[in-house]
Amino acid sequence: VQLQASGGGLVQPGGSLRLTCATSGVTPDHYATGWFRQAPGKEREGVSCITNDDGMIFYADSVKGRFTITRDNAKKTVYLQMDSLKPEDTGVYYCAWRWGYGVSLIQSAYHFWGQGTQVTVSS
């Protein structure tokens, strides 16, 4: 499984960005895709994840109400719509993939990782 994250950029506070995670390769019937981010000088943290089968979703408290994760199973693509962005949302955003059931933002549970895409929120 290969993952390609894209859509990052520079945006002003209060602005929006949409990240895309495209997956290629053989995928099982049940898997989940997650978004993680790493701010400068900080550890990587979970942002959101979604399952492919029943569309179960989980958000970190820091992004609830501002970020929306969606999926297009036919395209094997997951999107992260980020609205009302804050400077503290700045970081490198990674998408990752795990097989199995349910949602989780435990990083060690993910089997494949894509390269990151930089998101900078600044005026």
Image (spheres, grey):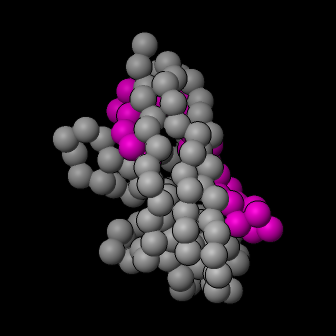
Q: Is residue 104 left or right of residue 66?
A: left
Residue nearer the viewer, 114 or 72: 114
| Quadrant where the image shows the N terminus | bottom right
Asked whether 82 falls inside the magenta stretch, the response is yes
Is residue 17 found left or right of 54 in the rendered image?
Answer: left
Q: Is residue 13 visible?
A: yes
Camera sees residue 103: no
Relative height, residue 51 to residue 46 (above, below): below
Does residue 44 sit above or below 52 in this rendering? above
Residue 79 in picture, x, y percent from top left:
64, 52
Residue at (51%, 71%) from the top-left corner? 97
For the residue pair 92 and 2, the one nearer the viewer reads as 2
* Of the pair 93 and 53, the residue shown nearer to us: 93
- Which residue sits furthest top? 123
Q: Quadrant of residue 6?
A: top right
Q: Residue at x 38, y 49 (%)?
A: 37
Residue at 49% x, 25% y is 10
The x and y percentages for residue 75 are: 76, 63
x then y, percent, for residue 65: 56, 43
Magenta region includes residue 91: yes
Residue closest to the eye, 14 or 111: 111
Q: Which residues are magenta?
A: 67-93
Q: Quadrant of the C terminus?
A: top left
Q: Is residue 52 above or below residue 85?
A: below
Q: Where in the figure is residue 12, as x and y percent of width and height?
A: 49, 19
The reply, left or right, for residue 121 in relation to residue 68 is: left
